Amino acid sequence: MSVSKRIFDLLVTILGLVITLPLLFIVSLLVWIFLGTPILFLQKRPGFKGRPFTTLKFRTMTERKGSDGKLLPDSERLTSFGRFLRSTSLDDLPQLWNVLTGEMSLVGPRPLLMGYLDRYTPEQMRRHDVLPGITGWAQIHGRNILDWDEKFRLDVWYVDHRSFWLDLKILFLTPWKVFKREGISQPGQATAEEFKGRK
């Protein structure tokens, strides 16, 4: 990661945290009212070079379990309030802390699941040659409505063409994409279907 990109991330993130502090408080309160505790959803995700870190998000699902004691599918635990948080990307706001600590960048491929690491092709694995981001090239080109091959192709394209001006373009277009609420989830999925690798 270049020094200039890190400085830019820090300046924008600190400013963003100051500006969104009241919003963070309000969303935290609403999550507590509608979903209870914990307010934050913490999960290990692969970062730079696949090294794990703990990503922070606002919780969007209940802890409802079936008769077998296991958690119900995501689609059955995702509430209307949780869908609102996801559609507006408000659930991602706590990841500003991950940017502040250097585990993420404002722009980069979205961090996925640790279990996907051994399913990538060598080309797909190149998405981890940069820090994961809160938003990215794939996010402004369809988000979760993209199939996995296309999503990874866009991620790797970003790795090969990343620049300060490209990051500015992505950051500029992201609010419009969020406002339009496009590509929030694949049909029949809470977000996107599981990536199972090449068959």
Image (cartoon, grey):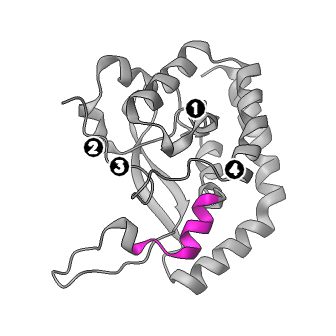
Res. 108 mark: 1
Q: Main secondary structure of the magenta part?
A: helix
Check contact, mark 2 vs mark 1: CB within 8 A: no
Q: Is residue 166 left or right of residue 135?
A: right
Residue indicated by mark 2 = 115
Quick check: 130 above or below 132?
A: above
What's under tag 1, amino acid-wise?
Gly
* Amino acid, disc 4: Val
Looking at the image, how many numbered discs can be counted on the residues? 4
- Earlier residue among tags 4 and 1: 1
Q: Which residue is mark 4?
A: 178
The residue depicted at 50 percent of the width and 26 percent of the height is 155
The earlier-in-sequence mark between 4 and 3 is: 4
Identify residue for label 3: 193
Quadrant where the image shows the C terminus = top left
Comes first in the chain, label 4 or label 2: 2
Q: Which residues are magenta?
A: 77-87
CA–CA distance between discs 4 and 2?
A: 28 Å
Residue 55 place in picture, x, y as percent: 49, 51
Alpha carbon separation for disc pair 4 and 3: 21 Å
Which amino acid does the dot numbered 2 rest on? Gly
Question: What's under tag 3, amino acid-wise?
Answer: Glu
